[in-house]
Image: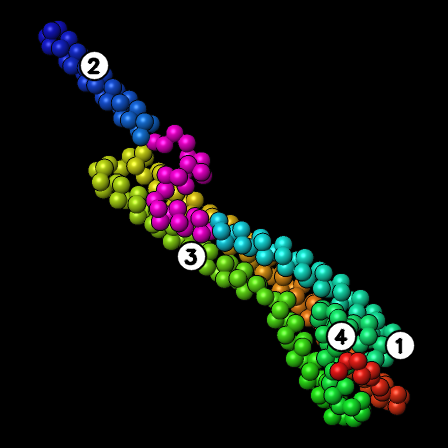
């Protein structure tokens, strides 16, 4: 009886030791199979070529977003300052001839508005009537629309990035998870060493999609507001030119230098 109990204890201890050893061995194997470093760069390097292409595209889109923000911010500020300076000239007690001379050679929006009005007045022979005001208003409307399109150029790219970047990142996520399941099927195991890298790569693609999309949307909304404010200045400039022409017509002193021809 004592020998039987002793044999049972020896067998139980041996089985426990084998189980403990097996668990330790599997843990060591899992640790060995896991990547040494799951930093973003290493995840990018070890990712599938499709996931890498998605990440590179999203990084490029983010670079384009910040480049457009910097360029458009500088452009809008410069053009807004020039427009305000031209508006201050129009608000003084001046005449169209003097305003045209001051803006001659200028390429900014308000200068184009003044020169376009002066050109129409010159083509009309300097005669003031209701038809002149209608023709000038039509010219100013066209110039204002052209200048507005010019200053808004590039903002459509931001809208495209903001709308599509999350879906591109989602595509990378789906592809990375699909590779994870393929790895599970080929390895015939569900341990963390097989699943973790693909999931990490998928989540990195999603994160890059959000990093590209969120600033693009915020910057697009900001630029839309600043461009709308600039368009309002152009509308004020057109109104001031029409008022200037109407004021000169009421005074009976409408004239324009022939140099504008």
The disc, 1 or 4, on the residue closer to the chain's N-terminal end is 1
- The C terminus - image quarter: bottom right
Residue marked by disc 4 = 237
Colour scheme in use? rainbow
Residue 45 inside the magenta-drawn segment:
yes
Do the residues bearing badges 1 and 3 touch, measured as CB atoms within 8 Å? no
The disc, 2 or 1, on the residue closer to the chain's N-terminal end is 2
Span shown in magenta: 34-58
The vertical placement of 184 against 117, above or below, is above
The disc, 2 or 4, on the residue closer to the chain's N-terminal end is 2
What residue is rendered at 30% in x and 48% in y?
178
Which mark's residue is nearer the viewer, 2 or 4? 4
Which mark's residue is nearer the viewer, 2 or 1? 1
Task: Depth check: give the residue in front, 27 or 198.
Answer: 198
Q: Please state if 198 lies on the left or on the right of 182 as rendered.
A: right
Which mark's residue is nearer the viewer, 3 or 2? 3
Magenta stretch, main secondary structure class: helix
Q: Which mark is residue 13?
A: 2
Q: Please state if 92 lies on the left or on the right of 18 as rendered.
A: right
Assign a secondary structure to mark 3: helix
On the image, the x and y values in percent for residue 190 come to 27, 37
On the image, the x and y values in percent for residue 106 come to 74, 69
On the image, the x and y values in percent for residue 32 come to 32, 27
**Dot 2 crowding, Cα within 10 Å, few <14, some 14–19, many 20+:** few
In the picture, residue 2 is in which quadrant?
top left
Assign a secondary structure to mark 2: helix
**Dot 4 crowding, Cα within 10 Å, few <14, some 14–19, many 20+:** many
Assign a secondary structure to mark 1: loop
Assign a secondary structure to mark 4: helix
Residue marked by disc 3 = 167
**Dot 1 crowding, Cα within 10 Å, few <14, some 14–19, many 20+:** few
Residue found farthest to the top: 2
């Amino acid at each position: 009886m004592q020998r039987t109990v002793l044999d049972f204890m020896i067998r139980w201890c041996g089985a426990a030791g084998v189980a403990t050893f097996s668990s330790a061995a599997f843990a060591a194997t899992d640790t060995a199979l896991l990547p040494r470093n799951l930093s973003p760069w290493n995840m990018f390097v070890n990712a599938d070529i499709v996931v890498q292409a998605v990440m590179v595209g999203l990084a490029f889109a983010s670079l384009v977003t910040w480049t457009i923000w910097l360029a458009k911010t500088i452009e809008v500020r410069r053009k807004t300052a020039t427009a305000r300076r031209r508006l201050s000239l129009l608000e003084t007690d001046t005449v169209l001839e003097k305003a045209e001379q001051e803006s001659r050679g200028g390429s900014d929006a308000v200068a184009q508005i003044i020169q376009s009005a002066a050109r129409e007045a010159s083509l009309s022979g300097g005669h003031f009537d209701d038809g002149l005001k209608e023709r000038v208003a039509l010219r100013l409307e066209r110039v204002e629309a052209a200048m507005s399109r010019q200053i808004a150029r590039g903002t459509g790219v931001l809208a495209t990035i903001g709308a599509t970047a999350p879906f591109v990142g989602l595509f990378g996520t789906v592809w990375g998870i699909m590779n994870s399941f393929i790895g599970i099927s080929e390895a015939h195991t569900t341990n963390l060493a097989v699943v973790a890298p693909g999931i990490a790569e998928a989540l990195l693609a999603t994160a890059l999609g959000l990093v590209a999309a969120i600033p693009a949307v915020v910057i697009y909304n900001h630029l839309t507001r600043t461009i709308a404010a600039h368009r309002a200045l152009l509308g004020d400039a057109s109104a001031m030119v029409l008022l200037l022409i109407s004021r000169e017509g009421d005074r009976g002193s409408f004239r324009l230098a022939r140099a504008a021809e």
